[in-house]
Image (cartoon, rainbow, N blue to C red):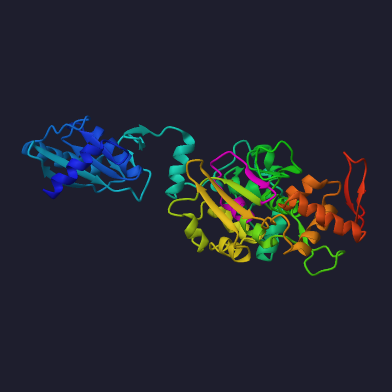
C-alpha cells in the first residue's frame, strides 16, 4: 500500500525533468535514449505502464519479463558508458507499473549506441548538438580542457620565444639552449603546444599579440561614479588585453587608481593605503584569469562602483563546487595546464587557498554562482556609507575626501559624495574643514569648476 500511495502521488504530480511516463516501450534504442537523458541530467524515474496523461494502462507479467530484459540490454549494450538502473514493480490493482530508477551519472557525458548525447529538457528530452555545450560536458567529465586545445590559425612563430626563454630559465635554472631538443618539442613537453601550433595556454601566457587571435579573452574594466550599472557616466574605462601576466598587472593598476587611498593616522602628504587590501584583488583576479571557462567566448568584466567592486567571470563554478565550498578552500582545476604555469608567473598559490586568503583579508566578500547566466561573480564591498550628520569617523571621512580630490582632481560636491558613498551634507562639512586648513581649493567657474588638492601637482 505504501508503494501504491507513493506511485499515486508521483502520477498525480505529472511529468517533469525527473519523472517520465511511458505506456510501453518496445524499442531498445528509444529506451536507451531515455536512460541517457536521465543519466546526463539530474537522474530520475521512468514509469512504464502509465500513459502521458497519467492514466494507468498497466502491464502484464509477460510485459514485465520482456521489459526487464530490455532495460538490462539497453543499460549495458546501448548506453556508453554502461549504467546500472534499478527497477521496482508496483501492483496498482489496474495492472503492474515498472518504475525504473536512473541515478545522475558520474561519468558524463553518456551516449546512446549511435553516439548521440541526450539531456532532459523539461519533461521531454533533447539531443545535444551545439559544440560549446558538448565541450562543456566533456570538460566537466575531465575528458577535454579548453586550455590544452590548439588555437586555430596560430603558428609557433606567434609565440614570444624571448619571453618564453626568460620564463624557462627562471623556472628551471638553465637556458633553453641547454635542453638539447627542438623548440617545438619542448613546448609540447610543457603542454604549451600541439604539433605545429600553440595551444590556448601557450598563447595566453607567451603570445606576441594574443588578443588578435583571441579577442574575447580580455578584461573590460569600467569605473562608475554611482552604484548602478546603467549609469550614463563613467569615471574611467579600459579594455585590458595582452598576455595573462600583462592583464593581471593592468587590472591591478586600474583598481588602484580608481579606489581611495586612506591616510588613517598618517600625515596628509603620505601616499596612504588602499581602502581595501591589495591582496584581496590579487587573489580574486588570479582566480578569474586562471579558472574562468575558456570555452565561453566572452570577456571578464571588472566594474568599480561607489559602494563595491564586481568581478564577473564567464562560466559558473565547475561540477560539485558551490560558494560555501570555495570559501573553505575546495577547488576544481578547470584549466590544469594554465594553472601549472600560472603558479610560476602570477601570484597564484594554487590548492584553493586564494579565496580563503582573500576572505581573511577582507570579510566583506560576496560570491554568486549564477548557473542560469553561466557566470561567477565576486562582489567586494567598499566602506560603509556614513549616515547624514554623523560625527563618528568624521576624521577618516576628511582624509578619504582629501585623497579622492588628490587622485581625481576637478570633481564637484555631488560626484565626491557618490564616490565616497556618503551624503552631500557630509561632503560639504568635510570640504569646509579642508579649505579651512588650506589643503584644497576650488578652481574654475562656479558651475563648471571643481576641487583640487594643494598638496598635489594636478592643474
Residue beneath the point at 60% across and 49% down = 201
237, 346: nearer the viewer: 237
Residue beneath the point at 62% across and 49% down = 311
In the image, residue 406 lies at what x, y percent? 85, 54
Locate residue 260: give its quadrant.
Answer: bottom right
In the image, residue 117 lies at what x, y percent? 36, 37
Q: How many marks?
A: 0
136, 363: nearer the viewer: 363
Residue span colored magenta: 285-307
Whether residue 197 sits left or right of residue 439 in the image: it is left
231, 294: nearer the viewer: 231
In the image, residue 176 lies at what x, y percent? 69, 58
Residue beneath the point at 83% across and 46% down = 411
Can residue 3 be seen in this snapshot? yes
Whether residue 368 sits left or right of residue 36 in the image: it is right
Relative to 451, say whether 25 is above or below.
above
- In the rendered image, residue 296 lying in the magenta stretch gets the answer yes
Whether residue 121 sits left or right of residue 308 in the image: it is left
Relative to 225, say whether 456 is above or below.
below
In the image, residue 445 lies at what x, y percent? 92, 40
Whether residue 171 sits left or right of residue 135 in the image: it is right
95, 170: nearer the viewer: 95
- In the rendered image, residue 141 lying in the magenta stretch gets the answer no
Relative to 430, say whether 373 is above or below.
above
Amino acid at each position: 500500500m505504501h508503494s501504491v500511495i507513493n506511485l499515486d502521488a508521483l502520477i498525480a504530480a505529472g511529468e517533469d525533468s525527473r519523472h517520465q511516463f511511458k505506456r510501453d516501450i518496445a524499442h531498445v534504442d528509444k529506451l536507451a535514449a531515455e536512460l541517457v537523458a536521465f543519466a546526463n541530467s539530474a537522474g530520475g524515474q521512468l514509469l512504464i505502464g502509465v500513459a502521458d496523461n497519467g492514466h494507468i494502462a498497466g502491464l502484464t507479467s509477460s510485459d514485465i519479463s520482456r521489459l526487464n530484459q530490455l532495460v538490462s540490454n539497453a543499460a549495458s549494450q546501448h548506453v556508453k558508458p554502461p549504467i546500472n538502473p534499478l527497477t521496482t514493480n508496483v501492483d496498482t490493482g489496474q495492472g503492474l507499473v515498472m518504475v525504473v530508477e536512473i541515478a545522475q551519472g558520474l561519468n558524463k557525458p553518456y551516449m546512446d549506441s549511435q553516439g548521440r548525447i541526450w539531456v532532459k529538457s523539461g519533461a521531454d528530452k533533447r539531443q545535444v548538438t551545439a559544440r560549446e555545450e558538448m565541450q562543456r560536458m566533456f570538460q566537466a567529465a575531465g575528458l577535454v580542457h579548453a586550455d590544452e586545445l590548439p588555437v586555430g590559425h596560430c603558428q609557433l612563430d606567434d609565440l614570444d620565444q624571448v619571453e618564453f626563454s626568460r620564463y624557462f630559465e627562471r623556472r628551471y635554472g638553465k637556458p633553453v639552449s641547454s635542453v638539447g631538443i627542438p623548440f617545438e618539442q619542448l613546448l609540447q613537453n610543457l603542454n604549451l603546444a600541439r604539433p605545429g601550433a600553440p595551444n590556448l595556454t601557450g598563447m595566453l601566457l607567451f603570445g606576441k599579440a594574443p588578443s588578435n587571435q583571441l579577442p574575447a579573452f580580455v578584461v573590460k574594466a569600467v569605473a562608475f561614479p554611482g552604484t548602478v550599472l546603467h549609469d550614463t557616466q563613467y569615471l574611467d574605462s579600459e579594455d585590458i588585453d595582452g598576455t595573462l601576466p600583462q592583464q593581471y598587472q593592468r587590472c591591478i593598476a586600474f583598481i588602484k587608481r580608481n579606489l581611495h587611498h586612506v591616510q588613517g593616522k598618517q600625515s596628509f602628504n603620505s601616499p596612504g593605503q588602499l581602502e581595501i587590501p591589495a591582496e584581496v584583488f590579487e587573489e580574486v583576479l588570479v582566480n578569474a584569469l586562471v579558472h574562468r571557462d575558456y570555452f565561453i567566448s566572452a570577456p571578464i568584466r571588472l566594474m568599480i562602483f561607489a559602494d563595491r567592486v564586481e568581478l564577473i567571470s564567464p562560466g559558473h563554478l565547475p561540477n560539485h563546487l558551490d560558494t560555501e565550498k570555495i570559501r573553505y578552500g575546495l577547488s576544481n582545476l578547470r584549466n590544469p595546464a594554465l594553472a601549472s604555469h600560472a603558479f610560476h608567473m602570477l601570484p597564484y598559490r594554487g590548492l584553493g587557498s586564494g579565496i580563503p586568503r582573500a576572505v581573511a583579508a577582507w570579510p566583506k566578500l560576496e560570491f554568486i554562482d549564477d548557473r542560469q547566466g553561466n557566470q561567477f561573480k565576486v562582489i567586494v564591498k567598499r566602506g560603509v556609507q556614513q549616515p547624514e550628520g554623523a560625527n563618528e569617523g568624521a576624521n577618516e571621512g576628511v582624509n578619504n575626501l582629501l585623497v579622492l580630490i588628490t587622485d581625481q582632481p576637478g570633481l564637484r560636491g555631488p560626484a565626491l559624495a557618490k564616490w565616497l558613498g556618503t551624503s552631500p551634507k557630509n561632503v560639504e562639512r568635510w570640504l569646509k574643514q579642508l579649505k579651512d586648513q588650506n589643503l584644497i581649493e576650488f578652481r574654475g567657474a562656479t558651475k563648471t569648476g571643481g576641487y583640487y588638492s594643494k598638496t598635489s601637482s594636478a592643474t
